[in-house]
Image: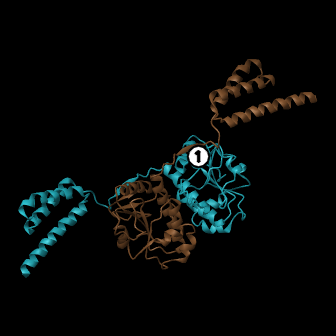
Chain colours: A cyan, B brown
Amino acid sequence: MTESPSTAQPAFILVRPQMGENIGAAARAMWNFGLDRMRVIAPRDGWPNERAVALASGAGRLLDHAGLHEDVAAAISDCTYVFATTARPRGMTMPVVTPERAMQQARAILAEGGRVGVLFGPERAGLENDDIARANAIISVPVNPDFPSLNLAQCVLLCAYEFRRAGDATPPEVMEMAGTDFATGAEVAALGDHMEARLEEAGFFFPPDKAESMRRNLRQVWGRLPLTRADVQTFHGILRQMVRWAEGRRKDL
Amino acid sequence: MTESPSTAQPAFILVRPQMGENIGAAARAMWNFGLDRMRVIAPRDGWPNERAVALASGAGRLLDHAGLHEDVAAAISDCTYVFATTARPRGMTMPVVTPERAMQQARAILAEGGRVGVLFGPERAGLENDDIARANAIISVPVNPDFPSLNLAQCVLLCAYEFRRAGDATPPEVMEMAGTDFATGAEVAALGDHMEARLEEAGFFFPPDKAESMRRNLRQVWGRLPLTRADVQTFHGILRQMVRWAEGRRKDL
C-alpha cells in the first residue's frame, strides 16, 4: 500500500480535482518539500491523467503511487486525524487553524503513531460542507481578504512548506563564509593602524584640532564592520597600491 | 512614484523574467498576501506584456504600477536593504536566511523607516552572481534537496506569505462556534443524568456487578467531549425519540 499515509508524513488528498495540470502541479509542490503520499478522489477527467503526468515532471512517481478513491469516506478511512483546507468559514463548530499550527499538530500526531490526511477541494468551488464535516479541523490560510484566491497547487505548496518547516532543522540564519573566516580583533586593529599610518602621511587628518576625533571615528568604523580575513588582506593590498600610486605621481611631478 | 517601496512593505523585484505568464502569476501571488509593490528589470518579451496581464487577472493593478528598470543597480537604488533569493549557495560571504527570518527582518527594517527590496531571478538560471553581490543577504527556501525546483511564482508566493505571517495577528487556532457556545458543566451533567436514566430503563447497565463501572465510564466520556449547547440539545432530542420509539415498539408487541 504505497499510498497509505505513513507515520512519517501526512497524505495530501485532492478531492474531485478538475484540471490535470493542477494535479501535476500539486505533485511537484508536495515533492518540493519532500512529501510523496498523494490520494485522488474522483478526478473529473479520469485516471491516470496525461496532463497531470506532463505537468508533474520530476514528481511523476507521486502520481504512479497515488491512491485513487471514490469518495472522502473511503480516502480517509485509515486516518486518525483529518484537516480540511477552506478559503472561508463554513458555519461548522470546528477548530480553525493556520497552516503553520496545523502542520505542527500533524507532526505531533504522526510522532505518536497516528495517520493524518489533508483534504484539498476542487479548483472552482472548494470542498463541500459534507466533505468538511468528515474532518477534525479546518486549515485556513491567512490571505489578503481583498484577494483570497489561492489556487490548488499554491494551497498544497503552503501546507507542504509548513510541514517541512515544522520538522526542519535549518537554522533561520547562517553566515556563508565562502572559504574564509572572520578576522580576529588583532587583525582588524592592525589594518586600522596600517590605514591610519598611511592617511597620516597623506595628510588626511586635517585640521589638527579635528584629527583626534577623525582617528577615533575611523577606528570605530573598522570595529563595526564584520570583516573577513580575506577582506583584511584586500584592504592591506589596497593601501599598498595607493602608496605605490602616490609615489609614482610624486615622481611624475 | 507608485512603484517605490514604501515603509510598509518591501518591493519585489523580478530580474530579467522570461515568461509573461510567470510575471502575472507572481503579481497574483503578491496580492494574495497584500503586497503590491512590484519592479521588473529588463523583461525578455518587453513591457507591458500581454501574457502577464492575462495571467494577473485580479492583480493587474500591480503590473500597471510596476516600476520598469534597466538593471539591478537602478532597481535597488532607493533600497536600504536588499535580499536575493537563490536555490543554491554561491560562494559569497553573506548571511543566508530562511524566508521566515528574512521577512521578519524586512518588517523590522521597514518599521525603522528603511526600504527593502527582494530580488527574484529569471526562471531558467536564477540570479547571476553579479546581481547577488549587490544584495545584503540571501534568502534560501529549505526545500527537498532531491527536488529543489521552485518556480518563480512559487518563490514569490512563499516570501509574500512569510511577510504577511510576520505581521499577522491571526491566532494560530480559533474555535469556530457557528452561533453556539460550549455547554456548561451543569448542562453536560444533566445530559449525562438524562441518558443514564433512560439507559437504566433500557437495561443497558448489565450485568449488575459491572453496572457501576459502566456508569462511571459513561460519565467520563461526557466530560471529555467538547460539547456545545446545540450538541447537548441534539442528544436530549435523540434520547426522547429513542424513548418514543421504544414505547411504540412495546405497543406493537
| Tag 1: amino acid | Val
Name the residue nearer the viewer: B71 or B204. Answer: B71
Percent of width and height locating residue A159:
55, 54
A196 relative position to B5: left or right: left
Name the residue nearer the viewer: A209 or B252. Answer: A209
Q: Which residue is drawn at 20% across and 53% down?
A: A185
Residue A212 in sight here? yes
Q: From this viewpoint, which residue is outermost toward the bottom?
A: A252
Q: From this viewpoint, which residue is outermost toward the right?
A: B253
Percent of width and height locating residue A61:
61, 61
Q: In which quarter of the image is residue A12?
A: bottom right
B218 relative position to B57: left or right: right
Q: In which quarter of the image is residue B14?
A: bottom left
Q: Quadrant of residue A199?
A: bottom left
Pick the quarter of the image with the C terminus of chain A. bottom left
Q: Is residue B216 above or below residue A230?
A: above
Q: Which residue is drawn at 74% across and 26% down?
A: B194
The residue pinned by badge 1 equals A96
Looking at the rendered structure, the secondary structure element under dot 1 is strand
Name the residue nearer the viewer: A15 or A213. Answer: A213
To which chain does the residue with label 1 belong?
A
Q: Residue at x 21, y 55 (%)?
A: A223
Q: In this view, does B229 lie above or below B90?
A: above
Q: Which residue is drawn at 52% across and 49% down?
A: A100
